[in-house]
Amino acid sequence: MRVLIAYASLSGNTRDLARQVRGHCEGQGHAVTWLEAGLHALADAGDPRHDLYLLGSWTDNGGRTPAEMKQFIADLVEAVGRPANVAVFGTGETQWGEQYYCGAVRRIARFFDSSFPRLEIEQMPHGQRDALAIRRWTDQVLATTGSNAHADPARRLA
């Protein structure tokens, strides 16, 4: 399966989360395109069409989506429309108020009308609990997308 992982990260927390998600996807034999919004453009992905889009973001002031992720989403919609297979992950801090916690994740998921669960991590991914949540979320999203039909055939037969 072709998976595009695009993320925005201010302090590196969301980048670390995206790396773990990427590792699980690649570990299951999927071809991953990796883009950091603001540093890479959608055009850097070559063909923008993918089987699954995993979008990650930190949350800006007042629960908002950062400008670089908004621009990436606008470029994605212009290139392929609103893809059906979009799952969203990100980091946030409850210290700014529960109503703002991972607000960007919630906004992006709502924009795409995503049927996938959201992955929301407090500050940075650390410890066994977060690692397990990341693995379970990634596995669930891949399974829901039909990864068994698209994954490396050698792995399915083994």
Image (cartoon, rainbow, N blue to C red):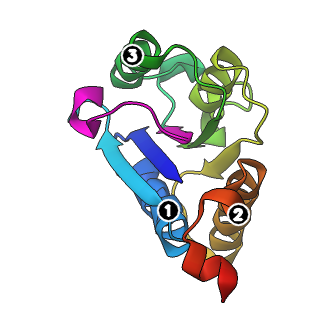
The CA span between labels 3 and 2 is 27 Å
Disc on the earlier residue, 3 or 1: 1
Instruction: Give residue 77's position: percent from left, percent from top.
Output: 47, 14
Give the residue type that dot 1 points to.
His
Neighbor class of circle 1 (other Cα within 10 Å; few <14, some 14-19, many 20+) is some
Q: Kindly identify which numbered label has been placed on residue 30.
A: 1
Of all residues, the one furthest to the bottom in this rendering is 158
User: What residue sits right under mark 2 in the picture?
Assistant: 148
Instruction: Give residue 95's position: percent from left, percent from top.
Output: 63, 40
**What residue lies at 42% left-to-right and 58% top-to-bottom?**
31
Q: Are the residues flagged by discs 3 and 1 in contact, CB closer than 8 Å?
A: no
Q: Viewed as shown, does residue 58 lie left or right of 43?
A: right
Disc on the earlier residue, 2 or 1: 1
Q: Kindly identify which numbered label has been placed on residue 79.
A: 3
- Of helix, strand and loop, which one carries label 2? helix
- Of helix, strand and loop, which one carries label 3? helix
**What residue lies at 30% left-to-right and 40% top-to-bottom?**
36
Q: Could you say which quadrant of the image residue 48 lies in?
A: top left
Give the residue type that dot 2 points to.
Asn
Give the foreground label among 3 and 2.
Answer: 2
Q: Kindly identify which numbered label has been placed on residue 113.
A: none
The answer to whether residue 25 is visible is yes
Q: Viewed as shown, does residue 158 lie left or right of 6?
A: right
Q: Is residue 28 above or below residue 74?
A: below
- The magenta segment is 42-56
Q: Quadrant of the C terminus?
A: bottom right
